[in-house]
Image (cartoon, rainbow, N blue to C red):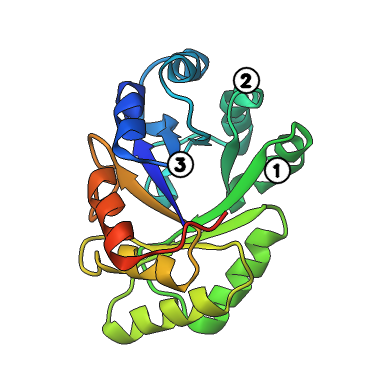
Amino acid sequence: MKIVAALTDPAHAAGAERQGADMVELRLDLMDGDPVEIFRQYRKDCSLPVIATLRSAPEGGRFFGSAGAWIEKIRPLLSSADYIDIEERFALHAPEVRGAGRKVIASFHAGTMLPLAELFGKERDLRAFGDIPKIVITPQTDADLVELVTFTEAAKKPIITGVMGSQFRYARAVLPLFGSAFVYCHAGDPTAAGQYSVEEFVALRKLLDIPCRD
């Protein structure tokens, strides 16, 4: 399991590295300025692998553009980012991203719960264009959370799973115990409700003895 510091400000990257993050996600949809310059500054301040994410509004972000506008913003970063987060609506650009040697986190975020069969179907769809599927949903009940844990344990690896919102915040610590590869934390301003800080999760990883899988 890798601790990912999800950042809204690249100036927090060096602090995230000092606190023990394994990777950084730059939430470009939450940042002002030229993405190329943001990455240039990041590389000066931090040596951790980096995920470039331009999250769409329908999946909880602030990018309102088309698939064409998305790739125009991402293309200049293909020589700088280690991973590119790609939602299904932008999947037609995955071959270009992978052709540039970047790994693809194929992501799906929903404000609802999916039945177990649909979770496996979504994993299959995401794995068709990405290297690591990322499925983040919103459980409504304890039974929903049990199904998400069951899916995480049974799914082909690597897999990233997570929850939206604060109701089941503790699931962010539980899911890595069952095979979720990344956990997204904050080192400054949270990018999602319920996130732990990097420092908190470093302590949790030690207390829970969560494996540091590649």
Q: Neighbour class for label 1 at 10 Å: few (<14), some, many (≥20)?
A: many
Disc 1 or 3, which lies upstream in sequence?
Answer: 3
Residue 136 x/y as whole percent: 43, 61
Q: Which amino acid does label 2 sit on?
A: Pro
**Nearer the N terminus, badge 1 or badge 2?**
2
Q: In which quarter of the image is the C terminus?
A: bottom right
Residue 19, image quadrant:
top left
Q: What is the secondary structure assignment of the residue under circle 1?
A: helix
As drawn, is 185 to the left or to the right of 214? Answer: left
Specify which label sits upstream in the sequence, 3 or 2: 3
Residue at screen point 25% across, 54% down: 203
Q: How far apart are marks 3 and 2 (CA)?
A: 17 Å
| x, y percent for residue 63 | 44, 36
Against 204, residue 43 (above or below) is above
Secondary element type, mark 3: loop
Residue 28 visible in the displayed image: yes
- The residue beneath circle 1 is 94
Is residue 137 shown above or below 87? below
Whether tag 3 and tag 2 are in contact, CB under 8 A, the answer is no
The residue where tag 2 is placed is: 76
Give the residue type that dot 3 points to: Arg
The numbered disc on residue 55 is 3
Under circle 2, the secondary element is helix
**Distance CA(mark 1)–CA(mark 2):** 15 Å
Residue at 56 percent across and 25 percent down: it is 73
138 or 78, which lies in front?
A: 78
Residue 169: x and y, percent?
Answer: 24, 64
Of tags 3 and 2, the one toward the viewer is 2
Residue 77 drawn at (x, y percent): 60, 24
Residue at position x 32%, y 47% from top? 185
Question: Which one is nearer the viewer's eye here, 158 or 21?
Answer: 21
